[in-house]
Structures are given as C-alpha cells and as structure tokens.
Image (cartoon, rainbow, N blue to C red):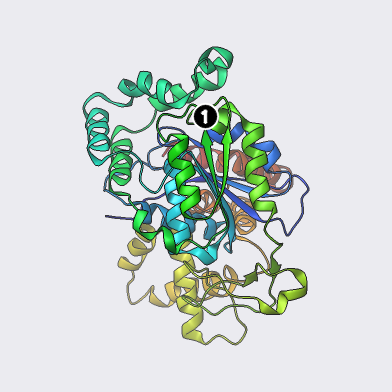
Amino acid sequence: MTVPVLRCTVHPVASGAPDAELLVLGPSLGTTTSLWLPPLAELSQRYRVMRFDLPGHGDSPRATESFTAAELAEAVLALVDAVGGGAFHYAGVSMAGIIGLQLALDHPDRLRSLSVICSGAKIGTTEGWDARATQARQSGTASLVATSAERWFAPGFLQRDPAHSARALNELLDIDDESYALCCGALAAFDVRDRLGELSVPTLCVAGEFDVATPPEGVHDLAESIDATFTLIAGVGHLPPLEAPAAVAAAVLGRADSIGPWVASARLAGAAGDGAATETNAPDDEATAAREPTGPSIPTWRPEATSQEIYDAGMAVRRQVLGDTHVDSANARITPETEDFQNLITRYAWGSVWTRPGLDRRTRSFLTLACLTTGGHEAELRMHVRAALTNGLTPAEIGEALLHTAIYAGVPAANSAMGIAREVFAE
C-alpha cells in the first residue's frame, strides 16, 4: 500500500477576498475534475475551490501500487497543505464521498463541513468491485462505457444534455486501466459502518432520485445514522453535479455557509511536525477559544527556531514541494565538497524562506518561475515547473506567468522557459 500522487486545480474566489475559505471537490470513479465544472461558478462566488483527480484520472499520474481510502485521504490532505493548508470544506461524489468520510474519521479537525454525494459507508460488494477491476485490466475502460452510461445518468439525460454526458463518457476512455482497477480495489476494501459513531463533522448526505449505484434509501440511512442533513435531488442519477448543478451548489453551499466563519490566529506554529499557522471555527466573539487543526502539517517559520529546527522544517517543505524522489536523488549525490552547499539550500531557501507565512506556496511558485526565467536558470526552472504543478498551479497559470515575464524580462528568456514548461507538461 502507498499514498498515491494526486493533481488538482485551484480556482480563486470570485470576490477576491483574501480570507476566503477553501472548498475541496472530489469526483466519482471514472470521472475527472470536469464533473464539477457546471456548478463551479456558483461555488466559487464565496469560496476558493480546489478540484482534484483520482489516480490515473485526468491530470493525476497513473498508479502502479494498491492504495486504500485512508491513503487517498492523506493524498488529498497533502494537496490542501500544498495550496495553503488549514481546515477546509469538502464535497465528494461516490468514490470521493468515501474519501470525505475517511477524512472526517481520521482528521475531523481539518474538515469544516462534509457533503457526501451519492456515496456511503460501504458501496457495493467486494465481489462486484473485484469483477469490475478484472474487466478494466482485461478489456480496458472502453468496455465500461455502456454500463457507466446506465449507472451514471437518469433516464433521458443522455438525450437532454449530450454535451455533458458525452464528455464524461469520453473522458472515461482516457483513464488509465490499472489505476481504475486499483480504485476498484480501494472501494472493495472500504467499509466504515462500524466507525460511523465517531463522526463529528457537520455533514450533508445527498442522493439522486434515480441513482442505482447508491440508491436514495441507503444514503438516507447513512444520514440518519450520523445525524446528518439529508437532501434528495429529483430527476438525477449518480452524478448530480452534471445533471443538476444548481441544486448541488445550493445544497453544498447551504451546508458550508451554515458553519461559522474561521478566524486566523496570530500565533505561528512550530517547525516540522508542530503544525501550521492556526485557525479556529469559533465565531468572532469567541476567537480566544482557537484550537489548532491536526493532521499533516506545513512547517512554518518562527523567529526563535533553532538552527536544527530550521533545517528540519526546510527538509520537510523541500520534500513536500519537490517530492521525495528528487530530494533523495539530490541527497544521494552529496559529496564532501557539496555537503555544505546542500545544507545551505535546505536551511536558508527552504527552511528560512519557503516556510515563511507571508506568502502561500502558489504565490512563491509564481515568483520563483519569474526569477528563474529572468536569470536563464533552465535546469532549476524545469524543477520548479514541476514544483509549481505540485503547489496547485495549472499549466494555463504557468503559461500566464511566463507570458507576463516575457514583457518584463525579455521574450527570448520566456520563450526558452515556455519550451521547458511544455516538456514538463508532456512528461
């Protein structure tokens, strides 16, 4: 088992409010971030929105090793930490719904609210998921298109909205077969029915009237068992964000908006392992009762940190941004002549600058790309294009950064940078 690598797309809040909370959206098995495109404009009116892809789906790398729902939840937390950390609202459809339940069980202090859409504490049977995995491996995801059309949509939706339904089914063709099968394995193993009494996160359970994969009765039973709000959306099947985006947006926003505003704490957290800058879900007049989120942490700069703490925090952030493979490779090449230089990079670049709370990692990636392009540092640029993707920048946003840099630093430098970025995107 291993924590898979996921990729995400982050959308700014329409109002531009600097204190906008984060809303994380997850897709159903066989779909991508485009599942959430129809309600995105409404959801991003008041929230910063992060959409992620499952392993081997959309922009996420293919998986080669099995994983569990708990490990997928850790992968989602890693994405959230890479784009600013803290607590967040979460809404997930089907497979992403089980990830949400796992997050609520394992990291309740990280979730502000949870919307479980067409999902459950146990979906289907182990035998059914094993058979689906075998079919994906032997015949590919193309063999699943017909049955998916029946499971996903309410009667008549294919005819009423051929654009959205066709796009979803076409995207299924591009999903990695083995990754799809491994997702089936995670679904087969998932069963948290005996842990539902532990749930404490404010939760909404949404069902589709014509959903055959997770029938409304089962979703209603889940809501009752955890004292959650239940919403039935009429006339839809298993993918309500496509079929009834306005209703889904209203339901998710209703759940998220009912939670009091978060208040940022002025207290900085410790170095690696000590947590991130703290926030509280208490109302403004109870801000003194702030509590610190648990779960994966983002090392944060402290003026009183010791030299070793700075180094440890720098190494933690360096691994989060560049990846273990890159850092392990760099460390393996250290010689007595280069050891001091590597320590300097870890301690000062990553430990003293990247951990500072004044800018989020997305912004630091924008600045780094501009500086490296201006200086013509192409080897470092390639590394930091990858890092920018990890930090939540989209290829389109990276392209905008390089276009902007072309005006102020010169077209030849930006042109070379564009070529490197294209190669990284292709990889």
Q: Classify residue 150 as left or right of residue 310.
A: left
- Of the 4 image quadrants, the one containing the N terminus is bottom left
What amino acid is found at the position of numbered circle 1 in the picture? Glu
Q: Position of residue 188 (x, y in %)?
A: 28, 43
Q: Circle 1 — which element?
A: loop
- Residue at x-position 61% and y-position 37%: 248
- Of the 4 image quadrants, the one containing the C terminus is top left
- Residue at x-position 65% and y-position 34%: 247
- Residue at x-position 50% and y-position 70%: 294
Tell me if I can see residue 46 in this picture.
yes
Q: Classify residue 263 as left or right of residue 113.
A: right
Camera-side residue of 160 and 267:
160
Q: Quadrant of residue 20?
A: bottom right
Residue picked out by circle 1? 209
Q: Position of residue 210 (x, y in %)?
A: 48, 26
Camera-side residue of 8 and 348:
8
Q: Classify residue 357 as left or right of residue 170.
A: right
Q: Position of residue 396 (x, y in %)?
A: 60, 38
Q: Quadrant of residue 171?
A: top left
Q: Is residue 372 above or below residue 242?
A: below
Q: Quadrant of residue 305?
A: bottom right
Neighbourhood count class around disc 1 (C-alpha, 10 Å): few under 14, some 14–19, many 20 upward: some
Tell me if I can see residue 411 in this picture.
no
Q: Position of residue 73 (x, y in %)?
A: 42, 55
